[in-house]
Amino acid sequence: MGLFQKKLHADVKLAPLYTIGGQQTLLLVGLGNPGDSYKGTRHNAGFDCLDAFVAGHEEFGQWVTKKDLTCTLTSGLFGSVKVICIKPITFMNNSGKAVHSVQAFYKIPNAKTIVIHDELALPFGQIRTSIGGSSAGHNGIKSLIAHCGEDFGRVRIGIDNAQKPTGDTKDFVLKSFNSTEKSHINALLRETESILIESIFQHKLTADTRSFILD
């Protein structure tokens, strides 16, 4: 058995995220904070997962900074689906500005937007997908909801562990993964990539139907 075990809830119907009719566009958003000092931190899990996804597929070109859209951007064609990947160059709590700008420029609705982000409500070793919902205190998601509405797809990367404080979690999320967690990062990135590929080629993101559990 691998590091993560996929559990599917048979009683939940699959909900199409988007349909294919000619060329369609899908927006993938990684959340994090820009700058070297934030690299490898728990709060940058969204950046790390999207970086790994782009690096693993030759369909994508180089990342390009789009100052007018306040993000770095790359895109690639997967069959009839154009996939645009962005990382906001704002700090986390202003992420919604970049996402809204890109959505408006490329005319991409929330139904074709998937956001990858860290999630304190889930233990490290779990990844869950959902569509819509509250911010659960995540400042990046809070900003997206304020700028774009709440009905976008989400790939939620669990970062909770036994050392998480019960009070202010700012320092916790801005610290690097511990040594045990780091030993599992590659498996985490592979599982996230699998979710994104399925979302592209199966034309759907399932809501709360899968969980990858640390053995």
Image: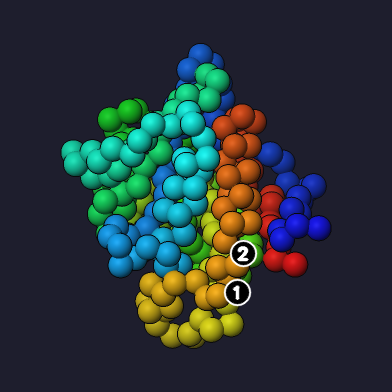
Question: What colour-coding does the image apply?
Answer: rainbow
Q: Position of residue 90 (x, y in %)?
A: 25, 54
Residue identified by numbered label 1: 180
In the displayed structure, 71 sits above or below 90; it is above
Q: Amino acid at mark 1?
A: Thr
Q: Is residue 84 visible?
A: yes
Q: For the point 37% across and 58% down, which residue is it?
A: 32
Q: Estimate how packed mark 2 is, as few (under 14), some (14 to 19) or many (20 or more) residues with alpha carbons within 10 Å.
A: some
- Helix or strand or loop: what does disc 2 sit on? loop
Q: Find out whether the residues at labels 2 and 1 contact each other: C-beta distance under 8 Å.
A: yes
Residue identified by numbered label 2: 184
Quarter occupied by the C terminus = bottom right
Q: Quadrant of residue 162?
A: bottom right
Q: Observer-nearest residue: 86 or 207?
A: 86
Q: Amino acid at mark 2?
A: His
- Helix or strand or loop: what does disc 1 sit on? helix
Q: Position of residue 76 (x, y in %)?
A: 44, 28
In the displayed structure, 135 sits above or below 177; it is above
Q: Position of residue 194 (x, y in %)?
A: 63, 43
Whether residue 102 sits left or right of residue 141 in the image: it is left
Q: Is residue 150 visible?
A: no
Q: For the point 63% across and 50% down, which residue is it?
A: 191
Q: Observer-nearest residue: 156 or 194?
A: 194
Q: Position of residue 130 (x, y in %)?
A: 57, 50
Distance from Cα at disc 2 to Cα at disc 1: 7 Å
